[in-house]
Image: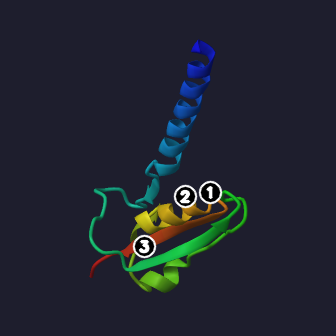
Amino acid sequence: MAKFMSIKLVKIWSVIALLISISACSSVTVRPYGGEKVTSKPDFQRSNDYYWWGLKGEYEINTRDICQEKRVMQMQAVNTPSDWIFQILTLGIYLPRTSKVWCEEK
């Protein structure tokens, strides 16, 4: 009976660990000129599609086209709630990730 309970606990903790790792928040923010994080609405936002746990898919964003003559104040790659839903439902086979860009206000 003790061995059965031990195996059951290992399975429960494995599921908990998996759920925590899947649902962990992750974002990458780059501020080329430093300063505080920008919290206003981004000037550009797009969802990029990745597949097979991120092994397939590569995207470039041309900030010169987005900001024109203005400086790029912040760039960010983030998992939105809808991105997480797709990642969980497809078990990581489809991984959308949202890109955001903020330009200098003139």
- 27 or 83, nearer to the observer: 83
In the displayed structure, would residue 48 be above or below residue 12?
A: below
Residue depicted at 43% across the width and 51% down the height: 25
Q: In which quarter of the image is the N terminus?
A: top right
The amino acid type of the residue labelled 3 equals Val
Viewer-nearest of discs 1 and 3: 1
In the displayed structure, would residue 20 be above or below residue 13?
A: below
Q: In the displayed orientation, state which residue is furthest to the top.
A: 2
**Could you tell me how far apart the alpha carbons at marks 3 and 2 are, in whole angstroms?**
26 Å
- For residue 102, what is the image quadrant? bottom left
**Could you tell me how far apart the alpha carbons at marks 1 and 3 are, in whole angstroms?**
28 Å
Residue designated by label 1: 91
Q: In which quarter of the image is the C terminus?
A: bottom left
Q: Do the residues labelled 3 and 2 touch (CB within 8 Å)?
A: no
**Could you tell me how far apart the alpha carbons at marks 1 and 2 are, in whole angstroms?**
5 Å
What secondary structure is marked by label 2? helix
N-term-proximal mark, 3 vs 2? 2
Q: Residue 88 carries which label?
A: 2
Image coordinates of residue 65 in percent, x first then y, are 51, 85
Image coordinates of residue 32 in percent, x first then y, are 43, 61
**76 sits left or right of 38 in the view:** right
In the displayed structure, would residue 10 be above or below residue 63?
A: above
The amino acid type of the residue labelled 1 equals Leu
In the displayed structure, would residue 47 be above or below residue 7?
A: below
- 19 or 42, nearer to the observer: 19
Viewer-nearest of discs 3 and 2: 2
Residue designated by label 3: 101
Label 1 neighbour load within 10 Å: few <14, some 14-19, many 20+: few
Q: Do the residues labelled 1 and 2 touch (CB within 8 Å)?
A: yes
Residue depicted at 47% across the width and 56% down the height: 28
